[in-house]
Image (cartoon, rainbow, N blue to C red):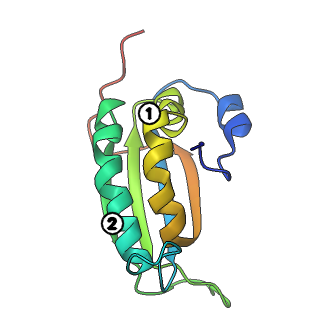
Amino acid sequence: MATPKDLNEAFTRELPDNGPVVMVNLVRFRDRSRDGNGTGWDAYSRYSKGDMPLLKKVGGTVLWAGHVEGAVVGDLGDGRWDWVVVVWYPSRAAFLAMMTSPEYAEINVDRENGVEDHVVLAANQTYSKFEVNRPAS
């Protein structure tokens, strides 16, 4: 088992790590899971159940998740996204600690079986209505 093959670890490590980060996940599911065990959604659901304890362990939390209805501004062209998940981490180091852990490598199999495409956009916080507790220095 290994970390996700599409993890851009070097890029993430080069970004400043001076506080919370939000990861915006755009997910497109396979019709059928690559392992034959249900749909892509089924496989991703198995992955999500395994991911929640790991996310909590590094101090992160899911802020919002939902099914994509379509573009209301702009044109997706031939592209489509099925699911959006917005995840808060206390730091980029916390995100990388989870993503590169042996425990994550085990559950990542279900993610890769279930998704046709998965893009994660890192966004630093410039504004939030949520109170942020920064880790002690």
> Is residue 32 shown above or below 123?
below
Q: Horizontally, is 120 left or right of 63 in the view?
A: right
**Picture coordinates of residue 70, whole percent (x, y):** 47, 87
Q: In this view of the protein, can residue 87 be seen by the observer? A: yes
Q: Amino acid at mark 1?
A: Pro
Residue at x 29% of width, y 37% of height: 56
Neighbourhood count class around disc 2 (C-alpha, 10 Å): few under 14, some 14–19, many 20 upward: some
User: Residue sitting at 53 percent across and 24 percent down?
Assistant: 18
Q: Nearer the viewer, residue 60 or 70?
A: 60
Q: Is residue 46 above or below residue 116?
A: above
Q: Position of residue 101 (x, y in %)?
A: 49, 33
Quadrant where the N terminus is found in the figure: top right
Q: Report the residue marked by disc 2.
A: 45
Of residues 5 and 28, the one drawn nearer to the viewer in this rendering? 5
Where residue 20 is drawn, which disc sits there?
1
Pick whichever, 11 or 55, lies toward us: 55
